[in-house]
Image: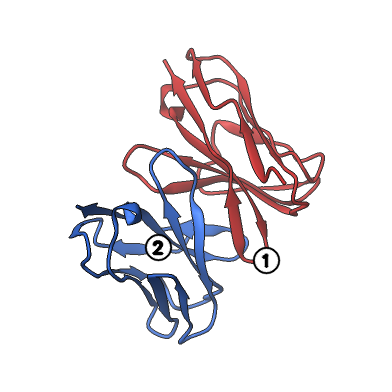
Chain colours: A blue, B red
Amino acid sequence: ILNVEQSPQSLHVQEGDSTNFTCSFPSSNFYALHWYRWETAKSPEALFVMTLNGDEKKKGRISATLNTKEGYSYLYIKGSQPEDSATYLCVEGAQKLVFGQGTRLTINP
Amino acid sequence: NAGVTQTPKFRILKIGQSMTLQCTQDMNHNYMYWYRQDPGMGLKLIYYSVGAGITDKGEVPNGYNVSRSTTEDFPLRLELAAPSQTSVYFCASRVTKTQYFGPGTRLLVL
């Protein structure tokens, strides 16, 4: 089982500020890196899937980058809004996915 | 498409009771998964299936059984419920690289 580590575990950000957090994963036998957004009492929702070193994906104010050689991915949120409050999960794998513990993001109005 | 549906939404079991958590997807996905999420923890894979008739253990399979007789359904069976199985259970299906999750089943074993 691969270890996927996310940091920080939790984060409080003022509305309007930008923020980012990190996912690290073993770089050997890499297949794909996923980011999911998970709101309380809901099911995880896919944000991005990245497979190639140097991949950058963007969805509105949220973007992500991937470095497979050094085994990390960053998720960026620009101009945070209260609706961005959620847990952001980083996941690596192919047939069997390995989930990080998540970064719980709270946006303070 | 309804996507991935799970029943029941919530259930309380007594220790030693059995139950089946239902999961159905209408997207014709071959891959299906069962995860559990314990309080303050991430998701742990219980079992997964790559197609009808094929299942395999995940990270935490003890105390559970699965079957996959059709593409659409992937039920999870608890034979002798234990307090350690108190959790939220998520079913998911996958096409290409993206997993689609069901709404979850909250199970309390007392």
Residue B71: image x %, image y %? 79, 46
Decide which of A64, A98 is in the foreground and name it. Answer: A64
Q: Say what amino acid the circle numbered 1 marks.
A: Thr
Give the letter of the chain under mark 2. A
Q: Residue at x 45, y 47 (%)?
A: B43
Query: Residue under circle 1?
Result: B96
Q: Say what amino acid the circle numbered 2 marks.
A: Asn
**Quadrant location of the C terminus of chain B in the rendered image:** top left
Q: Which mark is residue A3?
A: 2
Q: Residue at x 81, y 39 (%)?
A: B69
Up/down of A4 relative to A53, above or below: above
Up/down of B45 relative to B38, above or below: below
Q: Is residue B51 left or right of residue B45?
A: right
Residue A52: image x %, image y %? 53, 83
Q: Is residue A98 left or right of residue A62?
A: right
Q: Is residue A59 left or right of residue B70?
A: left
Q: Are marks 1 and 2 in contact (CB under 8 Å)?
A: no
Q: Residue at x 44, y 78 (%)?
A: A27
The secondary structure type at the circle numbered 2 is: loop
The secondary structure type at the circle numbered 1 is: loop
Residue A37: image x %, image y %? 43, 56
